[in-house]
């Protein structure tokens, strides 16, 4: 009652207060007045409004990020409006620190960003994004900062192939600044992650190619937080590629080179066969079977990338040497590869050799031999010249490989392993790829478990002196091919 009274009185004439009140009442009024002075906000106002300090648009970024900065944590709601398309952010209990804003963007589908005080008490600041068309966006609530990003939209993928390459056109993401590339093994895939991108609905998500080791393309929305579209190239071997951008047509272009062996005519010859077993291993395995397995793996690798492969034999049949060279010559093959496994009277003899006859064959061997060694991790017996019939009578560059010694326990054990035989084929494949000028589309050798593969320290102990090798070759029986010829 006292306060009411004093308020009324104060509204009339201040001077009267003192006159009309007894001394005790005056003291109370003064106390209340003091309280006002000490705690004005507590008594008079509700929670203070947040202040929007600024709004910025980075139009140099493909995602046109909009940053809203405030004094305190922002509370807001987001909605869209049609006719025309708009995105609206209402910031509650907010006041604009400066004037109304209109930022003209005119990039992609974004026209303007407008910011204004939409209403007072309650205070609402409204941010409107004027759009030319519906747009995917996302926002990050960072407390007193809000980040709005406009997603790119992948609108389609097309594929065109030529003689030695394929070109993939990805529409809608030319501005994409970040494409993460990754090689994935088993089976090999080339993965491209296109960030802050949305996949348009109803687009073709799979395209097959089937040329040059390039099986096809798959595309999918890999993630929505963050938005990532993943484009996968299914491949037989990794393909050399280059990423380009056409901003005018809004295309991200990935040009893929086929392996160098693509369409190359290669004759693969599995040594021996049928009634001719070739060498016999310490475990009783026939050379002809090992050679054929490696030849078939090589055939498959080459076929998978689109090489034009001809086999002298694909099964366990006898084939005279002249027939083998006749096939290569009549096919007009670009190269001839004869696959053998070695034998020696010296049990400790082991390792890899590659043979040529002419100069052209020497070049071929120079490419195959190092890849074979790399793939097999066996002792290097070098590239050598030999008068094998298949090397002398072929009219194209020809090489004969000897994939370890069946007469050596370690080598023979390795030659029993399918993965080792695959590695033989991989080594030859990589050598051929290198011979035809390829430098990228190699196949990685298979890791063979430690108990099977011999480490190099052990190889060192077994290493044969030059002198011994000399003796070995001069004393050796006739080369296997010539034996068969007899
Ligand atoms: Zn042989």
Image: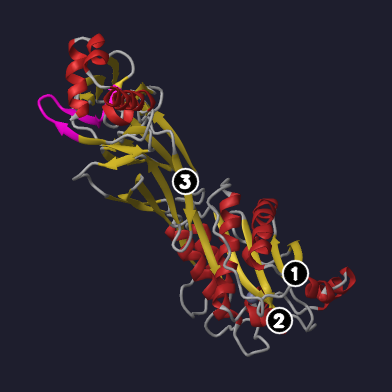
> How far apart are the two marked residues, 1 and 3, measured between alpha carbons?
37 Å
Quadrant of residue 450 in the image?
bottom right
In terms of sequence position, does the residue under pointer 1 or pointer 3 come before the other? 3
Q: Is residue 413 above or below residue 15?
A: below
Range of magenta residues? 79-95
- Residue 119 showing in the rendered view: no
> Mark 2 packing: few (<14 Cα in 10 Å), some, or many (20+)?
some
> Mark 1 packing: few (<14 Cα in 10 Å), some, or many (20+)?
many
Image point 64% across, 78% down: which residue? 414
- Residue 379 showing in the rendered view: yes
Image point 51% across, 57% down: which residue? 266
The answer to whether the residues at label 1 and label 2 have Cβ atoms under 8 Å apart is: no
Image point 39% across, 26% down: which residue? 38
Ligand 1 has an atom within 8 Å of the beta carbon of the residue at disc 3: no
Instruction: Give x and y (percent) for residue 461.
Output: 84, 75
> Mark 3 packing: few (<14 Cα in 10 Å), some, or many (20+)?
some
473 or 152: which is nearer to us?
152
In terms of sequence position, does the residue under pointer 3 or pointer 2 come before the other? 3
| Residue placed under numbered mark 1 in the picture | 379
Q: Secondary structure at mark 3?
A: strand
| Residue placed under numbered mark 3 in the picture | 181
95 or 406: which is nearer to us?
95
Q: Is residue 383 left or right of residue 440?
A: right
> How far apart are the two marked residues, 1 and 2, measured between alpha carbons?
11 Å
| Residue placed under numbered mark 2 in the picture | 410
Q: Is residue 17 above or below residue 246?
A: above
């Amino acid at each position: 009652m006292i306060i009411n009274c004093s308020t009324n009185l104060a509204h009339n004439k201040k001077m009267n207060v003192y006159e009309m009140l007894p001394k005790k009442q005056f003291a109370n009024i003064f106390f209340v007045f003091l309280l006002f002075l000490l705690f004005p906000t507590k008594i008079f106002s509700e929670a203070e409004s947040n202040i929007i300090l600024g709004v910025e648009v980075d139009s140099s970024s493909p995602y046109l990020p909009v940053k809203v900065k405030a004094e305190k944590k922002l509370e807001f709601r987001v909605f869209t409006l049609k006719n025309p398309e708009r995105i609206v952010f209402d910031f509650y209990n907010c006041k604009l620190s400066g004037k109304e804003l209109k930022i003209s963007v005119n990039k992609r589908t974004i026209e303007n960003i407008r910011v204004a005080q939409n209403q007072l008490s309650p205070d609402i600041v409204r941010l409107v994004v004027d759009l030319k068309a519906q747009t995917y966006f996302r926002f990050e609530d960072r407390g007193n900062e809000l980040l709005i990003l406009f997603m790119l939209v992948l609108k389609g993928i097309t594929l065109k192939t030529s003689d030695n390459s394929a070109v993939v056109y990805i529409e809608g993401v030319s501005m994409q600044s970040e494409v993460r590339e990754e090689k994935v093994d088993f089976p090999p895939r080339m993965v491209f992650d296109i960030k802050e991108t949305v996949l348009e609905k109803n687009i073709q998500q799979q395209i097959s190619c089937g040329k040059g080791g390039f099986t096809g393309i798959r595309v999918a929305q890999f993630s929505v937080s963050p938005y990532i579209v993943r484009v996968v190239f299914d491949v037989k071997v990794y393909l050399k590629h280059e990423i380009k951008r056409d901003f005018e047509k809004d295309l991200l272009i990935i040009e893929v080179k086929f392996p160098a062996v693509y369409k190359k005519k290669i004759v693969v010859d599995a040594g021996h066969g049928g009634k001719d077993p070739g060498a016999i291993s310490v475990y009783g395995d026939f050379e002809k079977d090992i050679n054929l397995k490696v030849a078939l793996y090589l055939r498959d690798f080459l076929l998978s990338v689109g090489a034009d492969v001809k086999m002298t034999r694909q099964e366990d049949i006898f084939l005279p040497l002249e027939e083998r060279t006749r096939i290569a010559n009549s096919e007009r093959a670009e190269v001839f590869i004869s696959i053998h496994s070695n034998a020696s009277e010296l049990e400790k003899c082991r390792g890899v050799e590659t043979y040529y006859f002419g100069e052209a064959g020497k070049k071929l061997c120079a490419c195959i031999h190092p890849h074979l060694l790399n793939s097999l991790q066996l002792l290097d017996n070098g590239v050598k010249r030999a008068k094998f019939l298949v090397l002398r009578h072929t009219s194209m560059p020809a090489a004969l490989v000897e994939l370890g010694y069946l007469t050596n326990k370690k080598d023979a054990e390795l030659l029993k392993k399918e993965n080792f035989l695959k590695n033989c084929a991989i080594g030859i494949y990589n050598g051929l790829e290198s011979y035809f000028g390829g430098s990228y589309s190699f196949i990685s050798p298979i890791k063979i478990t430690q108990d099977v593969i011999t480490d190099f320290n052990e190889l060192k102990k077994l290493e044969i002196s030059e002198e011994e090798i000399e003796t070995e070759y001069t004393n050796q029986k006739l080369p296997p091919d010539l034996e068969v010829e007899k």
